Image (spheres, grey):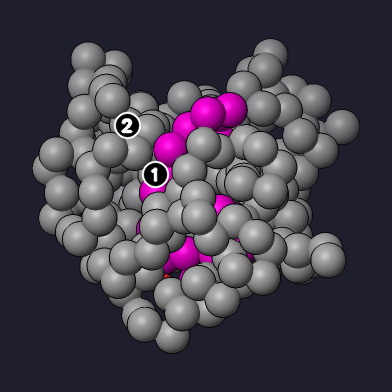
Amino acid sequence: MKLPISDRLLACAAFVASGDRVADIGCDHGYLSIHLLTNGIARSCIAADINQQPLLSAVRNAEKYGVHSKMEFHLSDGVRSIPRDFTCMVCAGMGADTMISILEAAPWLQSSQYRFVLQCQSKTPMLRRYLSDHGWRITEESVLRDGKFLYTVMEVYYEPEYPRLTEAECYFPPALLENPSKDIPAYYKWVVEGVRIAAAHNPEKQPVLAALEALAETEELHWLEK
Ligand SMILES: C[S@@+](CC[C@H](N)C(=O)[O-])C[C@H]1O[C@@H](n2cnc3c(N)ncnc32)[C@H](O)[C@@H]1O
């Protein structure tokens, strides 16, 4: 029985390391954890959701796919009501506001013992700004197209000595280039177009636009326009 998991969640799974104990926050149907366990990637998974109905569907799906014994299920707002003994926290399919409120509520996450995999649905530059300002470093980020939409998935570590991202880097972070993909040019163009529209109404965005446009001329990115 094939698991109906999206390419977006598979891209998140690609950042999970073998043997990780995963906390899937906002698990909904539980497909990510089920995929990680049926493929022998994660050692165990904590599936958490703020709402009862999604959590119940994760329980049912875990039983259906035979991984129930390797999963724990917690009704939890963010990480408030889950055990802290995980190694990798995945938050996927949420906007930056929700992710930031989850991180704000748990200062204990500011620790090098945790790795995050974040797939942000909206206001991603704001999430990158927050992470960078609070001591987290985006070590890798990948772009993918799933259906009509472009998504990014980031791997994040607590590394407070690392330099902060510039404003332009919050829109197009250097970490994206660690994972060259065919969808990067489309993502770059989409980002620049969004900033161009914002800059037309807000002069404060002009320097960000100029920095992003200059990026296309650099050695690392000159292939974008080809
Ligand atoms: C759009 S779904 C994404 C599900 C899955 N992670 C994915 O990417 O396909 C968002 C899920 O996050 C849950 N959620 C929203 N805010 C949350 C919070 N503060 N803590 C835990 N779960 C939350 C919702 O109930 C919902 O099930």
Q: Residue 25 magenta-drawn?
A: yes
Disc 2/disc 1 C-alpha distance (Å): 7 Å
SS class, disc 1:
strand
Where residue 73 appears, x then y in whole percent? 38, 64
Question: Which is more toward the observer, 87 or 219?
Answer: 87
Question: Which is more toward the observer, 163 or 38?
Answer: 38
SS class, disc 2:
loop
Binning the other alpha carbons within 10 Å of mark 1 as few (below 14), some (14 to 19) or many (20 upward) gives many
Residue 140 versus residue 88 in the image, above or below: above
Q: Residue at position x 43%, y 85% from top?
A: 53
Q: Is residue 83 left or right of residue 141?
A: left
Establish whether ligand 1 lies closer than 8 Å to the Cβ of label 2. Answer: no
Q: Residue 134 magenta-drawn?
A: no
**Mark sitting on residue 89:** 1
Where residue 74 appears, x then y in whole percent? 32, 65
Establish whether ligand 1 lies closer than 8 Å to the Cβ of label 1. Answer: no
Quadrant location of the N terminus in the rendered image: bottom right
Q: Amino acid at mark 1?
A: Met
Instruction: Tell me which corner region of the image, top left, top right, bottom left or bottom right, holds residue 32.
Output: bottom right
Q: Amino acid at mark 2?
A: Tyr
Q: Quadrant of ligand 1?
A: bottom left
Q: Write down the residue under mark 2.
A: 114
Where residue 200 appears, x then y in whole percent? 47, 62
Question: Which is more toward the observer, 209 or 58?
Answer: 58
Q: Which residues are magenta?
A: 16-33
Q: Is residue 29 visible?
A: no
Label 2–label 1 contact, CB within 8 A:
yes
Q: Is residue 23 left or right of residue 65?
A: left
**Mark sitting on residue 189:** none
Q: Residue at position x 35%, y 80% from top?
A: 51
Q: Residue at position x 60%, y 68% from top?
A: 63
